[in-house]
């Protein structure tokens, strides 16, 4: 491919060469000639705020060489909007690109910008919106087959839920269920479930409806705890739920006692259950028992955190005062 | 797979006793195997020969039987990371300010004299080319200004210090640009048209406090942002929305709790005021403590970023740095006073992970033994070493700086060495400021310079 310098289409542009900063700059990069030239043309078109077809091709070329270049992504988005391009076509290259560059996160902000623009041009009830959402969900599921804990993909998924009101959408909970069935320790999936169920505006609190929901979710987490009691995710999930509903931890005392008990200090199956039990004792003002449970954690079941467990025990003294 | 190492450990004839705590798998393990547990086990197996010292020659060990800090090789690695990089590293083209900061900070921690080594001019020249007339620094010449790049640029300039470095920064333009990044909900976007996240908030507060920028909004942003008309408006409340049901903090409300974002959030709160005031005002401290404690991995001793994720050397800083700030916040609850505890986390565990698992034999530090070292992991493992080796206390009485100006709280920290760790004097890195992650005196010098400067 001939360079921009020989291309008659670009002959009107005077490239702006890079200033790395002085004779001995920090961490300068020995750019390839191709990258260096493309960037010089980008600086030149950005300086005169040009948005055109050739600028789109230029941004694609640079992103191909360096997908982590946030400036180019943002400039490309501006160009797409200024030129009133058919934004759906953007996904033709964006999707395979995302699957090739799993760690890249600029792409997810770009996607967000494009979907937002597409949606704001459509009526909220248009079937096209439903289609678009389904395509997004399918694509995200594909991304998760490659990396089920990708932070930026999950953040994007949350935005999608909020933007398109997917709180009651079966696909959302199913997608999470699927991932948790594959790996019950996927904390990102637990976080998403919490968001879908309790993150909605006006999520039910202490109403009958709220309590049904609370019980359903506690049951869900309980089932997960039974297959792997040392997995912290469902324990955190339950504690989050009880705190959302301002319920005492003693609601789940029998669950905690199944996996940890002071009567059988040699048969503890979960350090999380034991900590929870200690907290429940504290709630019930049985401070001695709480202290014993934290001792057990410090000395036997979770010694790396012994100082933390001892701190909690010490704080009982201030609670008693 | 993992159990094979027991044999090795028993047959090891090293003259050092290996504490079981740092060489045994967690006492409670579930039998169910999933992708997460497979990776966790694999990582434990990968680290075990390093934790049990079978990988080292006796001459590599310090007087306590841990691998020595390979200081000279890390200095060489950090110096090299600031030289010209090969063309295939072009994906770092928008992260050159970061590369600069990681190298400069690493060298500071390794006690290299930056001025003597010629870094002042190079730093000034490099960042002059990244600054935009409309305010802020971008990833390189002609790139949009970005809060992370501005953070890295300003910290590097402050770390090399001196008038030429300070005067490189166009503070008036920086202030106006920060005004444009400020959002009506209290947070900051990282770049014009880009995402709003807690990195943005933290970086903005680092810039405001070090450079002593005015806190009122530029007049042209008043109507758009609303609130009380300052850059701080709604910020603490926005940070508090980033605390998740797990107790940790995420990059933006409702996302998953994550060590790097927790550090940014806590750092931001500790710039807004004294740690024991702002942290409990905006966060549930008990939940935070629970989440943070559980990030320390067994048996590796290092930290992971999220629940059920793997230990990784860079979290030595992100999570370890949280501990420095959180311990100071607990002073009001008796920590450092009536409490019998000198620490709430296992400093020796982290020390062992960094010295034994995270050091590359030929220089540079890494995520875990199977990964190559890089500038990012070198900087943040060394910072983690500093958090493990020192106590960090917030103390209202300071003589070297005027504490009446706004955002003075971050200039009241002091650091003292923690004794009784299995490391020798040569394994110790320089004390660092727990929020700015540069030497204390460098932060104070810059603050004083800008406090005494009349006008912009
Ligand atoms: Zn890392």
Image (spheres, coloured by chain):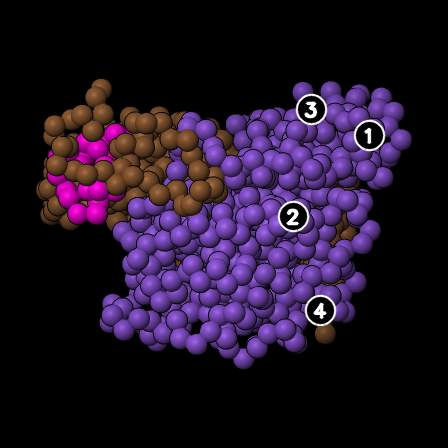
The answer to which of marks 4 and 3 sits earlier in the sequence is 3
- For the record, the magenta segment spans A41-64
Give the crowd class for mark 4: few <14, some 14-19, many >=20 residues within 10 Å.
some
Q: Which numbered disc, 1 or 4, marks the residue that appears first in the sequence?
A: 1
Element carrying mark 3: loop
Whether tag 3 and tag 2 are in contact, CB under 8 A, the answer is: no
Is ligand 1 closer than 8 angstroms to the Cβ of mark 4? no
The first of marks 1 and 2 along the sequence is: 1
Please give the label number shown on residue B2: 3
Residue A244 in the figure: left or right of residue A229: left
Q: Which residue is mark 2?
A: B112
Please give the chain letter of the residue carrying mark 2.
B
Count neighbours of disc 2 (C-alpha within 10 A) and say few if under 14, some if 14 to 19, many if 20 or more. Answer: some
Identify whether B155 is placed above or below B328.
Answer: above
Q: CB of residue at label 1: within 8 Å of ligand 1?
A: no
> Closer to us: mark 3 or mark 2?
2
Which residue is painted at 32% across and 27% down in the image?
A33
* Cα separation between marks 4 and 3: 41 Å
Nearest the eye: B327 or A144: B327
Q: Please state which of residues B350 and B138 is positioned toward the viewer in this rendering.
A: B138
Tell me how far mark 1 sits from mark 4, CA to CA. Answer: 43 Å
Disc 3 from disc 2: Cα separation:
40 Å
Q: Quadrant of the N terminus of chain B?
A: top right
Which residue lies under the disc numbered 1? B59
Q: Earlier in the sequence, mark 3 or mark 1?
A: 3
Mark 1 or mark 4, whichever is nearer to me: 1
């Amino acid at each position: 491919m001939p360079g921009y310098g020989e291309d008659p289409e670009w002959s009107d542009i005077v490239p702006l060469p890079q200033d790395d900063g002085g004779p001995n700059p920090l961490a300068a990069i020995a750019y390839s000639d191709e990258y260096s030239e493309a960037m010089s043309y980008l600086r030149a078109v950005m300086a005169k705020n040009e948005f055109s077809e050739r600028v789109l091709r230029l941004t694609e070329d640079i992103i191909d060489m360096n997908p982590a270049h946030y400036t180019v992504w943002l400039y490309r988005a501006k160009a797409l909007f200024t030129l009133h391009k058919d934004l759906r076509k953007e996904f033709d290259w964006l999707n395979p690109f995302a699957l090739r560059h799993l760690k890249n996160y600029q792409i997810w902000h770009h996607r967000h910008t494009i979907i937002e623009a597409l949606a704001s041009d459509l009526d909220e009830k248009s079937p096209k919106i439903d289609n678009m959402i389904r395509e997004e969900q399918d694509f995200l599921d594909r991304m998760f087959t490659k990396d089920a804990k990708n932070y930026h993909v999950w953040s994007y998924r949350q935005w999608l839920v909020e933007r398109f009101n997917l709180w009651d959408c079966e696909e959302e909970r199913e997608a999470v269920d699927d991932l948790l069935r594959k790996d019950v320790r996927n904390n990102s999936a637990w976080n998403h479930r919490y968001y879908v169920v309790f993150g909605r505006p006006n999520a039910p609190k202490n109403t009958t409806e709220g309590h049904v929901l609370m019980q359903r979710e506690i049951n869900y987490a309980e089932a997960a705890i039974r297959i792997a009691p040392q997995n912290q995710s469902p324990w955190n999930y339950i504690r989050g739920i009880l705190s959302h509903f301002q319920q005492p931890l003693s609601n789940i005392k029998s669950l905690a006692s199944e996996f940890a008990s002071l009567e059988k200090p040699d048969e503890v199956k979960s350090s999380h259950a034991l900590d929870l039990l200690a907290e429940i004792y504290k709630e019930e003002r049985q401070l001695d028992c709480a202290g014993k449970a934290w001792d057990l954690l410090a000395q036997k079941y979770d010694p790396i955190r012994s100082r933390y467990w001892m701190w909690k025990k010490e704080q009982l003294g201030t609670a008693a005062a | 797979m993992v159990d094979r190492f027991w044999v090795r450990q028993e047959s090891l004839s090293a003259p050092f006793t290996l504490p079981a705590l740092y060489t045994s798998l967690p006492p409670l393990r579930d039998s169910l195997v999933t992708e997460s547990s497979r990776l966790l086990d694999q990582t434990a197996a990968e680290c075990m020969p390093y934790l049990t010292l079978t990988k080292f020659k006796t001459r590599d060990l310090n007087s306590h039987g841990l691998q020595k800090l390979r200081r000279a090789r890390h200095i060489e690695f950090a110096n090299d990371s600031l030289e010209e990089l090969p063309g295939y590293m072009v994906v770092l083209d928008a992260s050159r300010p970061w590369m600069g900061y990681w190298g400069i900070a690493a060298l500071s921690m390794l006690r290299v004299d930056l001025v003597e080594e010629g870094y002042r001019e190079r730093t000034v020249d490099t960042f002059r080319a990244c600054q935009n007339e409309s305010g802020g620094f971008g990833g390189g010449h002609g790139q949009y200004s970005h809060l992370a790049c501005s953070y890295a640029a300003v910290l590097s300039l402050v770390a090399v210090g001196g008038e030429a470095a300070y005067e490189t920064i166009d503070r008036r333009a920086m202030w106006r640009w920060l005004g444009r990044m400020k959002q009506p909900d209290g947070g900051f976007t990282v770049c014009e048209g880009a995402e709003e996240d807690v990195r943005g908030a933290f970086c903005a507060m680092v810039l405001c406090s070090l450079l002593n920028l005015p806190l009122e909004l530029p007049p042209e942003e008043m109507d758009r942002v609303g609130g009380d008309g300052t850059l701080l408006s709604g910020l603490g409340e926005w940070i508090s929305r980033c605390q998740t049901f797990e107790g940790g903090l995420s990059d933006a409300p409702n996302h998953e709790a994550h060590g790097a974002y927790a550090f940014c959030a806590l750092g931001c709160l500790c710039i807004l005021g004294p740690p024991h005031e702002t942290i409990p005002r905006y966060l549930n401290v008990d939940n935070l403590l629970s989440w943070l404690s559980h990030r320390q991995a067994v048996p590796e001793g290092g930290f992971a970023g999220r629940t059920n994720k793997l230990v990784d050397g860079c979290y030595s800083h992100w999570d370890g740095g949280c501990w420095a700030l959180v311990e100071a916040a607990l002073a009001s609850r008796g920590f450092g006073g009536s409490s019998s505890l000198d620490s709430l986390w296992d400093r020796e565990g982290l020390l062992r992970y960094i010295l034994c698992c995270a050091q590359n034999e030929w220089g540079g530090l890494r995520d875990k033994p199977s990964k190559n070292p890089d500038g990012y992991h070198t900087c943040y493992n060394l910072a983690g070493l500093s958090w493990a080796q020192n106590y960090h206390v917030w103390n209202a009485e300071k003589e070297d700086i005027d504490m009446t100006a706004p955002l003075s709280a971050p200039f009241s920290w002091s650091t003292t060495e923690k004794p009784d760790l299995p490391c020798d004097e040569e394994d110790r890195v320089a004390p660092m400021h727990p929020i700015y992650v540069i030497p204390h005196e460098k932060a104070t010098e810059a603050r004083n310079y800008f406090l005494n400067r009349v006008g912009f």
